[in-house]
Image (spheres, rainbow, N blue to C red):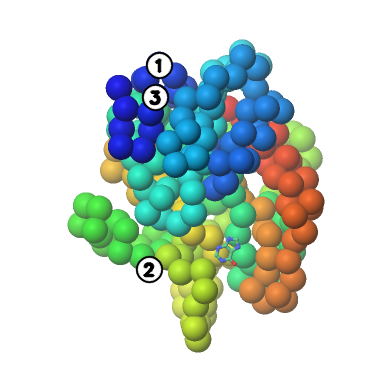
Amino acid sequence: MATPHINAEKDQIADIVLMPGDPLRAKLIADNYLTNVKQFNQVRNMFGYTGYYNGRKVSVMGSGMGMPSMGIYSYELFKFYDVKKIIRIGSCGALTKDLNIYDLILVNSAYSDSTYAYVQNGSTDKTITSSLNLTNKMEEIAKKEEINIIRGNIYTSDVFYKENFSYDEIINKYHCLAVEMETFALFHNAKVLSKEAACILTVSDSLVTKEEISAKARENNFITMIELVLKSI
Ligand code: HPA
């Protein structure tokens, strides 16, 4: 079988999928952490791999950037490949000066002003929560490994380059700590299809201080997140 965007058989994809935005990050996870790896997708270079971590079958696949891309891949994985759980591993921009570059955010809920949910099924929900089960498990592992994480809400935006945009309401009314571009669509799809989704993010830049992470530091922090997520599944 195949979907319009994933050329794989059902049994080639595990029931849990880790999704970084960048498909090359998916390859990095597969190459460095999984054994007995098989590539299951290369359509549009959105690489997907399945392998084993401590005997547990797990898949990794890029989501691409933005809700349309995440929306397509997560929907197809959940609906047509019987995937039960998806964990996004991404980056975000800080909206508060209390967050530092490199901080890890474990997402409680995603707020969005996007029409994604409304167009998808008529939902007017502006905030969608993560799976408590997956999120609590990640927090438990973080505590055990003494990895500092901040649990909080994030804003999922449709637009990276904005003119004269105020984040005041997003920060004060919706209590968002950071901005990224995919999670709301992932959580919405999980809810619609009765599946589980969670998300962990590294702060890669700050909209307050304008500081930015280097590519090398981003990779190091990415490794902390991968290890945390793999140990929690
Ligand atoms: N804006 C939106 N998405 C992001 C950002 C940002 O500043 N940083 C990482 N993902």
Q: Amino acid at mark 2?
A: Asp
Q: Quadrant of the C terminus?
A: top right
Tell me which label, 1 or 2, sits earlier in the chain.
Answer: 1
Tell me which label, 2 or 3, sits earlier in the chain.
Answer: 3
Residue 209 at what x, y percent from top left? 72, 76
**Dot in front, 1 or 2:** 1
What residue did someone put label 1 on?
11
Numbered tag placed on residue 113 in the rendering: 2
Q: Horizontally, is 135 left or right of 82 in the view?
A: right
Residue 102 at what x, y percent from top left? 74, 56
Q: What SS does tag 3 mark?
A: loop
Vertical order, 216 against 134 (above or below): below
Q: Quadrant of the N terminus?
A: top left
Residue 103 is drawn in which quadrant? bottom right
Can residue 120 be seen in this snapshot? yes
Q: What SS does tag 1 mark?
A: helix
Vertical order, 185 against 227 (above or below): below
Q: Amino acid at mark 1?
A: Asp
Q: What SS does tag 2 mark?
A: loop
What residue did someone put label 3 on?
8
